[in-house]
Image (cartoon, grey):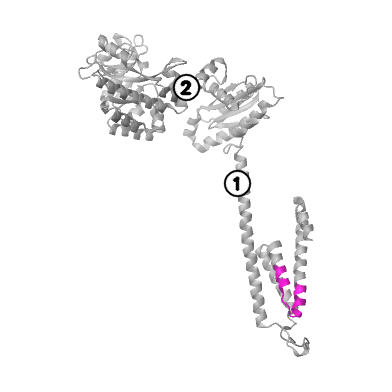
Amino acid sequence: MMIFSVLLMRGSEDRKWQSLSVMYVFSFVCINFGIIISVNGYAKGEQMLTFLTMELFVVCLLVWRPIWGFIVLTTSYLIFYYRISGMIDLSTVGKFTGVVDFSTVETGLGDGIKINGFTMWLSTLLFCIANYNKTLSQAQKDENLEEMNTYLSRISVEDELTGIHNMVYFRSEAEKLLNYVTTDKERVIFLFFDIENFKSYNDKYGFYAGNELLIKFAHEINNSFKGSLVARYSDDHFVVLTQSEGSMNIIEMLSESIHHLQGEVQLSLKCGAYKPIGNESDVSHACDRARFACNNIKKHFGRSFCLYDKTLEERFTLKQYIVNNIDNAIESDCIKVYYQPVVSTKDGTVCGFEALARWKDPNYGLLPPAMFIEVLEEYRQIHKLDMCIIENVCRDYRNAVDNNEPFVPVSLNFSRLDFELCDIVGYLGKMADKYKVPKSYLDVEITESALTEQQNFLQNATKKLHESGYSIWLDDFGSGYSSLNVLKDYNFDVMKIDMKFLSGFDDNAKTKTILKNVVDLTKQLGMNSLTEGVETAEQFKFLESIGCDKVQGFYFSKPQPYEEIKKLITSGKLKMPSNA
């Protein structure tokens, strides 16, 4: 019966009650067998080990739940002692003669037998409970382990938030698909989706509502591209590998879907696309190109789709080159400092320099800042560049002073990421100490746009800079929408007025009025003013007349290496102050 029970339990779930019935019958047979054998043995003065063994076997191995163990034990013990209650302890009566006269012996169980029986019942019950707890504990561990394995298996291929596939699954399956002989690579396309302005949605409605939107859109995109590979790339980004035919209609439909989900915040869907070339099967490479195409149309109103082409290929190649070679460029001294003079309106002398980065590359030649600064910020490597500029400026100061050459304070441009990715304030102090540069010769410029996020964090950083003895400049004032808030929340020593204010200087009468009022505002706030983009003598004279303290622009000099600046000083085109 035991063999039959085991074989039966290995069957399907619908045969569960059949196997349990066999187990119960088998348990009954075992208990009955133990009672009969032990009662007969007891009558001969033998031990009742068979009964005890069957009890342990049934209650601990077959029916191991305590409540059932209690019922089985109590019932079987009562039956057993009822069966022997009419007998006497034959082990003592007739022990030597082997003959017993039941008519002369008092029947019934003595106190010793009762106590021993109760002790056996209690011991067996406790053993049953202990075995149950041990078995239950192991079962729970096995169940937890199974649940954990199931969970790990699920999250290894599924995005935890949205429930659609993640990039691990996408890369694996996409690579298989691209390598199938039956796949027509001419018809497949990688799509990269970005929900533009999603951060504003999070700020207004909270992260919970933002997550709900992502979940809804994830299922929307998953249902729209049935039969295709869909995955969440990161944050509010999604990727799809699908057939190019008919994909544009789905993209337009998804764009409409985003507008229905947006609420009061204006959301838009941007999509970048990349079509593999030849036998290309690098999924990460393809996703990067689709992403690059998508980023190319961000902040472009009215454009929702961009296909990766040859022009983007050249830009993408340069971008990858910049990211992969920034460390080598720093080590090989390809990063140069160009200085642009800052001139005082009071006497026309150079009162400072702005340090600007240039990349002299052996393959691409001279790279302007616009080609590499945004890329380094995107890939969170901008701090490497800024730290390099800091040391080069400090070294130039030391060389100039040691050679008795004129030198004035230099302003350094700091990115918001500098404060996150490294201890930029500590590094600045370290370089100043190393090259013995007075802190009054190092000014820090922070762009207005960098101050619109993480205000508490940056307020603490600017406070630390002030306490360390550095002058802090607000760069590009007027280029963003939060200018007045920035002036209210931060303390600056100099306000750099964005060069856009001078556009239309000769044609727009409002330009001069606005500039005058901005300069007056800096005086009321206890700051010095500096206007960028000065290109004509008329602009310089006007700024001088309204009390602007400093000016900067091509009218005086474009950014140049310090050796070229020295030539302008020697020729008299740039006037240095007497204390320089």
In depth, the one of 32 and 191 nearer the eye is 32
Secondary structure mostly seen in magenta is helix
In three-dimensional space, the C-alpha distance between marks 2 and 1, rounded to whole angstroms, equals 43 Å
The answer to which of 93 and 13 lies nearer the viewer is 93
Above or below: residue 484 compared with residue 21: above
Against 403, residue 458 (above or below) is below
Q: Which residue is mark 2?
A: 322
Mark 1 is on which residue type?
Met
Residue 40 x, y percent position in the rendering:
77, 77
The image quadrant that residue 466 belongs to is top left
- Looking at the picture, which amino acid does disc 2 mark? Ile
The residue drawn where x is 73% and y is 71% is: 50
Residue carrying label 1:
148
**Horizontal arrangement in the rendering, residue 417 relative to residue 284 (left or right):** left
Is residue 452 visible from the viewing direction of this image? no
x, y (%) of residue 122? Answer: 64, 72
Residue 206, percent across and down? 49, 36
Q: Give, as a single range, the part of the protein colored magenta.
A: 35-55
Q: Earlier in the sequence, mark 2 or mark 1?
A: 1
